[in-house]
């Protein structure tokens, strides 16, 4: 059975973000950043948008066949948006500022 990668369209963005949120639910680093379930569910999708949101319009998000599994390719300038988002949402003690 041959399965090919397919580009995720802008209309599939919400599904792709939801898939990534589910995939990282038990990730130790992500859950250190967002320890409370409510924080994780509200803020992690924002972080994904900040880091990889532009990849949707550039055709840089892919899925495997009809599967919801997603892979997001991001340009280097995305890291500054992720950093800005992280500083804005993380409680101050989390990133060493008292």
Image (spheres, rainbow, N blue to C red):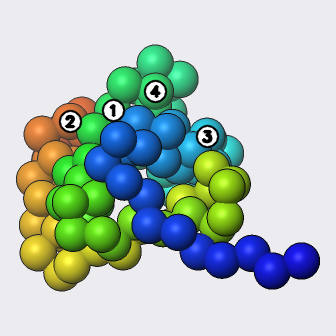
What is the total number of numbered labels drawn onto the structure image?
A: 4
Which of 38/67 is in front?
67
* Residue receiving disc 3: 22
Q: Do residues under tags 4 and 2 come within 8 Å of each other at their CB atoms?
A: no
Quadrant assignment for the C terminus: top left
Q: Do residues under tags 1 and 3 come within 8 Å of each other at their CB atoms?
A: no
* Residue receiving disc 2: 89
Check disc 3 and report its element: helix, strand or loop.
helix
Check disc 2 and report its element: helix, strand or loop.
helix
Q: Do residues under tags 3 and 4 come within 8 Å of each other at their CB atoms?
A: no
- x%, y% of residue 52? 28, 60
Q: Choose top left, top right, bottom left or bottom right for residue 19.
A: top right
Q: Residues within 10 Å of mark 3 (few under 14, many from 20)?
A: few
Q: Do residues under tags 1 and 2 come within 8 Å of each other at their CB atoms?
A: yes
- x%, y% of residue 46? 28, 39
**First-in-chain label (4 vs 2):** 4
The label nearer to you, 4 versus 2, is 4
Check disc 4 and report its element: helix, strand or loop.
helix
**First-in-chain label (1 vs 2):** 1
- x%, y% of residue 15? 49, 39
User: How far apart are labels 1 and 2 at the CA level?
Assistant: 8 Å
Q: Residues within 10 Å of mark 4 (few under 14, many from 20)?
A: some
Q: Is residue 52 above or below residue 91?
A: below
* Residue receiving disc 1: 43
Q: Which mark is residue 41?
A: 4
Q: Tell me which residue sits at (89%, 77%) in the image.
A: 1
Question: Taking 33 as reference, is 31 left or right?
Answer: right
Which of 78/92 is in front?
78
């Amino acid at each position: 059975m041959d399965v090919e990668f397919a580009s995720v369209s802008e209309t599939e963005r919400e599904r792709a973000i939801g898939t990534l949120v589910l995939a990282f639910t038990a990730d130790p680093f992500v859950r250190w950043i967002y320890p409370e379930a409510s924080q994780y569910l509200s803020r992690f999708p924002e972080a994904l948008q900040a880091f990889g949101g532009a990849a949707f319009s550039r055709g840089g998000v892919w899925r495997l066949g009809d599967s919801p599994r997603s892979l997001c390719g991001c340009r280097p300038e995305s890291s500054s948006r992720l950093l800005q988002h992280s500083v804005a949402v993380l409680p101050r003690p989390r990133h060493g500022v008292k």
